[in-house]
Amino acid sequence: MGELTPAVTAILMALAGALSAFAVYWYFIFRRVLPLEASLEELRRQAEQFREFSIKKSREAKTLYDVAALTAQATQAQSALSAMVAIIATYLEADVAAFLLLDEATGELVTQPGGHGLEKEEQSYRIPLADGNSSSARVFKSGQVFITGDAQNDPGVITHYARLWKIHSLMTVPIKKDGRSIGVIRAGSFKRDYFTREHAELMGVVATEAATIVETAMLNRKLAETAQQLEALNRIKDDFVSTVSHEFKTPLTTIKGFVSVMLEGDTGKLTEQQVKFLTVAKTAVGRLEQMVGELLDLSKLEGEMAMEFKPMVLDSLLRASVEAYRSQAQAGGKALFYDIPKGLPMVRGDESWLRLVVDNLISNALKFTRSNGCVRISAMEKGDFIMVCVEDNGIGIHPEDKERIFDKFYRARNSNEISAPGTGLGLAIARQVVAKHGGKMWFESELGRGTRFFFVLALASHGEEARIQ
Ligand SMILES: Nc1ncnc2c1ncn2[C@@H]1O[C@H](COP(=O)(O)OP(=O)(O)OP(=O)(O)O)[C@@H](O)[C@H]1O
Ligand SMILES: [Mg+2]
């Protein structure tokens, strides 16, 4: 081999230099890339973890949303609970799930209908709280969550049921209201070691919502029972009032008849004192008779009674009622005016019931007006209605009595002031009668100055309507 020329040597050296520079370059590149690769791997792992975490969280959020929506719509606790069981089964991917609630009467936990993954006959069983082998009873009493991954061999579980349902994992969470257990939720899986603390947390949230539903359902049931009892009591009271009033009617008529006969002297001459006593007796019987009549009217109104609506002329009814009270007004030194325009259209009504209304309003106006006062009855057409007004310049009604004046048996404080007899039923009856006609009754009053009672009745329909000339 010949000697290398300096030029070739120089080229070779340059090449060697370039190669080592290249190697050094790659060495540095690799030094930087390798850790980068490692961190990339780490990043990938974290991204995967984050993806799993967000799936889990969104599943939790969806569960919570579904449960909350269910709670808001729940009208029937039972169906809401079975829907919740379905939610648990979906989000926990459990194979069986059921609610057990405490039956306070027997001290047992009772499975609620609508369990998931269970046959009908497997669903209905009761666990006494005293059963030491039952994990549900323990969870109920301790308020602590129970999880096992091997339910068929766990001494803390009634393994018979675990085998029956073929489950290996079991999770039981208490349902608490105000710190007190009211039941438990159970979820089971065919897989071993399936349930985790996170599952338990999610089920805990469902349990809180379930507690609200169960509590509301219990309150509703109690309310419904109370309402039923009240209704029954009310019916007994109404029946009693109606029967007693009927029974009173005949003897009262007899007493009234005999007292009148004696007062008229048909049984012999009476002393002044006898006349006085018999007159008192007659007034008292009259009052009793009125009260019995009102009680019977009320029981008819509140019963199944149907009114007989016909087109009718209201002004002749008003006139007849005024005339019936004319002598009473005169005897009390009160003026009774009548102000009804001619040609009022007919109304649709039941004549005998409407007469009761007008009679009571006039009787009240006279009762609560001192002598020298006056009472005025007027009527006017108002669109599709006729408005009747009974006005007096009597003692008036205290504003604090306003709310209750139409209540049954309510007599305002002014009835003591003027010692007016009565039962407090007249206005209750009047308002109900007007309401049954589809009308309205109300009043305006000023203490010490007088009162105006109004009611409106619908005009008879066009086919039936006739104008009085
Ligand atoms: N025109 C009126 N002026 C003042 N107070 C009145 C008037 N009408 C009714 N009231 C008050 O309203 C109460 C209830 O009236 P309502 O007609 O229901 O019963 P009442 O007249 O006392 O008894 P009843 O009508 O059963 O014989 C009366 O006791 C009275 O206190
Ligand atoms: Mg009255």
Image (cartoon, grey):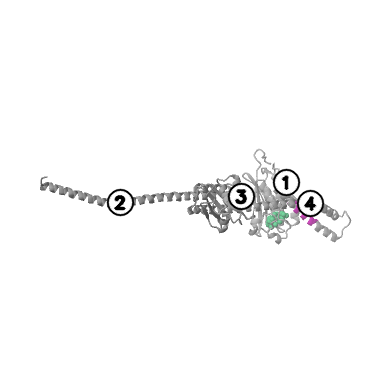
Q: Is residue 258 left or right of residue 237?
A: right
**Front residue of 438 and 31:** 31
Three-letter code for the amino acid on which mark 2 is drawn: Leu
Q: Mark 3, residues whose alpha carbon is within 10 Å: few (<14), some, or many (≥20)?
A: few
Q: Earlier in the sequence, mark 3 or mark 2?
A: 2
Q: Position of residue 108 (x, y in %)?
A: 62, 54
Three-letter code for the amino acid on which mark 3 is drawn: Tyr
Of circles 2 and 1, the one toward us is 2
**Front residue of 70 and 306:** 70
Residue marked by disc 2 = 34
Q: Earlier in the sequence, mark 3 or mark 1?
A: 3
Label placed on residue 125:
3
Residue marked by disc 4 = 247
Q: Earlier in the sequence, mark 4 or mark 3?
A: 3
Q: Position of residue 208 (x, y in %)?
A: 53, 54
Q: Earlier in the sequence, mark 4 or mark 1?
A: 4
Q: Earlier in the sequence, mark 4 or mark 2?
A: 2
Of circles 3 and 1, the one toward us is 3
Magenta segment, prevailing SS (helix, strand or loop):
helix
Q: Is residue 287 magenta?
A: yes
Residue 216 appears in the figure: no
- Give, as a single range, the part of the protein colored magenta: 282-294
Q: Mark 2, residues whose alpha carbon is within 10 Å: few (<14), some, or many (≥20)?
A: few
Three-letter code for the amino acid on which mark 4 is drawn: Glu
